[in-house]
Amino acid sequence: MKHKPFLFIFLLLLLLGLVACMPTDGAEQTAENSSNSVTSDEEVNEGETASVALDRCSEAPVGTTLFTNVEDGYCLLLPDGYAVDDSLTTDNGGAETAVYVDSMLDSSHARLFITVEAANGRTLEEVTTTKQEEFADFDVLYTFGYTLDGVPANQFDQLPGQDLSRVLLLVKDGRFYTLTFTPDDPAAEGAYADMQTLYDTVLTSFSFLR
């Protein structure tokens, strides 16, 4: 009988040790829930940011289609009937988007090419001067003082090439944008009229996503 108190104490200590070693499921679950909550909040914030960016794009009225290039940071409206290929790249590694009717090589319809590349510190004035020097031997018309979504842009008209082209240059947030419309040639008749419609539609709807 005198050994029972010691046995009781031993069993009590053993029970307390087992309880201390048991995992605290409640605490772990709370931490997991907290982590999931943070991830969820980040996803919501990203979704809200994307939504705000897309809210800058114009609604597409009848006869037009909204095109959004998230990677290059812009959206615009196009007249119905145009196809878009935004998987192209330029010779210097920039991104290029082609807008066309039947094919990118079809010169019987209006076309638009948009290139986006790193400005590498260049200003609008510098890229404009480079373009002027490139066509110094030609009687090229140019107009300064345009804006696209509030960003200054300069325009060159009837630049020589496979087809005469109308080119807009602008620089924003370290990126150099070039919009090339063809054919900028009144002799092309129907294609020229379509180019003018394409040009007007794009310029009045062009928006940056950020």
Image: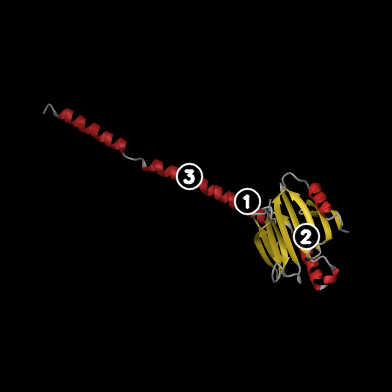
Q: Secondary structure at mark 1?
A: helix
Q: Earlier in the sequence, mark 2 or mark 3?
A: 3
Amino acid type, label 2: Leu
In front: 139, or 101? 139
From the viewer's perspective, is residue 100 above or below residue 52?
Answer: below
Quadrant into which the N terminus falls: top left
Please name the residue that numbered disc 3 is placed on: 35
Position in image of residue 90 (x %, y %): 69, 56
From the viewer's perspective, is residue 113 above or below residue 119?
Answer: below
Amino acid type, label 1: Thr
Q: Is residue 199 left or right of residue 42?
A: right
Q: Earlier in the sequence, mark 3 or mark 1?
A: 3
Please name the residue that numbered disc 2 is placed on: 203
Q: From mark 2 to mark 1, how far is it between C-alphas? A: 25 Å
Amino acid type, label 3: Ser
Q: From mark 3 to mark 1, how far is it between C-alphas? A: 21 Å
Please name the residue that numbered disc 1 is placed on: 49
